[in-house]
């Protein structure tokens, strides 16, 4: 929405009327104003009131009518309501002081100037007046508009104070830089480096929110390089930081897996906005640290790094208090299978190998290939072209085999119950053996993926095991 339109629309007009009715100065502030100048759409509107934000929210809700209930957070003196697609937060102007080890501010009322200077960055400190006397007037006390134009992240106060007030702001600085392609100058980075251990007082949930947003940047490597440079990465994701470095034994080196990983994440970000596929790219090589070995005559090996990596995914998610749900399993699966299609792309690929890949990857097979394509970081142009071409062949094969054999959501055409009934069996090992033989025969291409072929094979396999069938047909 254009600000000229926004400022004249019903929502802002109503807030303006309410502000005058209640007799309080009132401003739209922060991200909404920043995003307006950046020509980015924003659905979150922050309103600062020099007085009670809660009273204002109640009055606005009454006047606007079609709003959600007003949600009040008394300790923070804030109130929130939803209107149309917007989430509007009202807050009383504050002058806050934070005790060194606490995240909980002791809220005390302040002027607009107090409120503005305690905000995180100059680009987030712009306010626009909503009272009738100066409706639409920009208040820019810390040169925020210039900083938006010059694309820099700067704190309104001495950064020591700003970051000590809320250490999450160190991550926010890097997130804004990475999302918006803004600069953070060396001095500010030095302050972050000095204060980096203060991130430990922040809850994991808030940290993950920032990591996710860095991962969703157009070029996440920018944010992750800054995290590494400031020592924050070592604290919040030590497994990624540990990928850094090149060892040399007997004149043999391996690639720097940290920079390789960042390249892969950037590559995949050009192809997908799927946060979890980007996580898989970030974590695909983490198992290389614990599995790294140097073998004389062979060189550097990372045997079993995919399996080790998939186990580490669980530990990382758990450590960061991320939900251990299907998304985590999806990331684990992609990490575990991350080298499988590479082998296929190097050989003359058989149908049965493709069937096995589809069977094991299921719905994630296309995403897996997308990761493998992103994983090609060779600087040798010929080789790059060849690998890409090979993955094209693998993709086409997948489509071809899938159309014919329908393996992706493989359900065995004969289930355990039918095997038990056919041979009058109680639960036993033989049922599993027959099921496995049918699955193998389908994946190998020895029989078709259909009921009749599977039924016939079941009878043959039963016979081999000395079982007698009471044939239905
Ligand atoms: N803010 C702050 N320090 C924080 C978090 C927020 O000073 N740790 C201030 C900033 O002025 C920010 C405003 O509160 O603009 C609203 O915060 P938030 O909604 O988290 O961020 P936005 O700036 O709106 O940006 P985005 O929605 O893109 O995160």
Image (cartoon, rainbow, N blue to C red):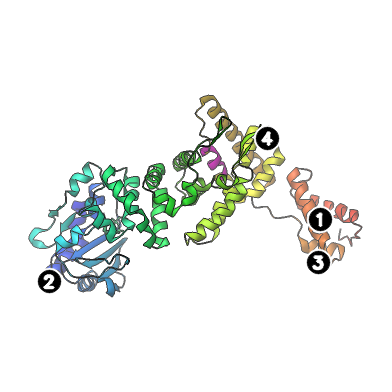
Q: CA distance from mark 1 to mark 3?
A: 13 Å
Please tell me which of labels 1 and 2 falls first in the chain: 2
Residue 97 or 177: which is nearer the viewer? 97
**Where is residue 447 shown, x and y percent of the image?**
78, 45
Q: Which dot marks residue 434?
A: 1
Q: Which residue is mark 4?
A: 349
Measured in 3D between alpha carbons, the distance from the residue under mark 2 to the one under mark 4, in whole angstroms, is 75 Å
| Region of the chain picked out in magenta, as a range | 368-374
Determine whether, in the image, residue 171 is placed left or right of residue 471. left
Residue at 42% x, 48% y is 215
Ligand 1 shows up in the quarter that is bottom left
Q: Are marks 4 and 1 in contact (CB under 8 Å)?
A: no
Separation of residues labelled 4 and 1 (CA atoms)? 28 Å
Look at the image and tell me in which quarter the C terminus lies. Answer: bottom right
Check residue 373 for magenta coloring.
yes
Residue shown at 65% from the left, 34% from the top: 296
Give the structural element (helix, strand or loop) at label 2.
Answer: helix
The residues tagged by marks 3 and 2 sit, at their Cα atoms, a distance apart of 77 Å
Q: Which residue is mark 3?
A: 427
Give the SS element for disc 4.
loop
Image spot of residue 399 (x, y percent): 62, 41
Residue where numbered disc 2 is placed: 21
Q: Residue 431's quadrant in the figure?
A: bottom right
Callout 2 environment at 10 Å: few (<14), some (14 to 19), or many (20+)? few
């Amino acid at each position: 929405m254009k600000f000229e339109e926004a400022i004249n629309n019903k929502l802002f007009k109503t807030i303006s009327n309410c502000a005058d009715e209640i007799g309080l100065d009132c401003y739209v502030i922060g991200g909404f104003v920043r995003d307006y100048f950046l020509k980015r759409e924003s659905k979150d509107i922050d309103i600062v009131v020099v007085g009670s934000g809660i009273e204002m929210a109640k009055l606005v809700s009454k006047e606007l009518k079609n709003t959600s209930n007003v949600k009040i957070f008394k300790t923070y003196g804030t109130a929130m309501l939803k209107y149309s697609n917007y989430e509007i937060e009202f807050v009383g102007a504050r002058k806050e002081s934070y005790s060194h080890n606490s995240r909980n501010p002791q809220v005390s009322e302040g002027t607009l100037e107090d409120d503005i200077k305690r905000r995180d960055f100059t680009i987030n400190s712009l306010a626009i007046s909503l009272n009738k006397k100066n409706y639409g007037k920009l208040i820019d006390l810390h040169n925020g508009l210039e900083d938006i134009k010059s694309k820099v992240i700067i704190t309104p106060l001495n950064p020591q104070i700003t970051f000590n007030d809320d250490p999450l702001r160190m991550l926010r600085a890097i997130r804004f830089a990475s999302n918006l392609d803004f600069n953070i100058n060396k001095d500010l980075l030095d302050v972050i480096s000095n204060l980096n251990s203060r991130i430990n007082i922040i809850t994991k949930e808030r940290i993950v929110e920032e990591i996710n947003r860095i991962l969703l940047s157009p070029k996440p490597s920018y944010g992750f390089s800054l995290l590494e440079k400031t020592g924050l990465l070592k604290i919040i994701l030590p497994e990624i930081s540990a990928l850094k470095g090149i060892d040399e034994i007997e004149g043999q080196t391996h690639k720097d897996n940290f920079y390789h990983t960042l390249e892969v994440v950037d590559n995949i970000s050009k192809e997908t906005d799927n946060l979890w596929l980007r996580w898989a790219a970030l974590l695909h090589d983490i198992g290389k640290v614990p599995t790294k070995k140097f073998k004389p005559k062979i060189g550097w090996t990372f045997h079993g790094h995919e399996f080790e990596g998939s186990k580490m995914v669980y530990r990382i998610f758990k450590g960061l208090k991320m939900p251990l749900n299907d998304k985590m399993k999806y990331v684990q699966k992609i990490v575990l299978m991350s080298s499988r299609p590479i082998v296929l792309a190097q050989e003359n690929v058989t149908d049965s190998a493709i069937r096995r890949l589809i069977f094991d990857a299921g719905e994630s097979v296309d995403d897996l290939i997308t990761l493998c394509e992103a994983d090609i970081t060779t600087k040798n142009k010929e080789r790059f072209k060849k690998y890409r071409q090979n993955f094209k062949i693998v993709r086409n094969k997948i489509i071809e085999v899938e159309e014919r054999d329908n393996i992706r959501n493989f359900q065995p055409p004969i289930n355990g119950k039918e095997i038990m009934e056919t041979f009058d069996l109680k639960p036993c090992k033989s049922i599993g053996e027959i099921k496995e033989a049918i699955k193998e025969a389908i994946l190998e291409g020895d029989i078709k993926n259909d009921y009749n072929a599977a039924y016939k094979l079941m009878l043959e396999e039963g016979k081999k095991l000395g079982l007698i069938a009471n044939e239905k047909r």
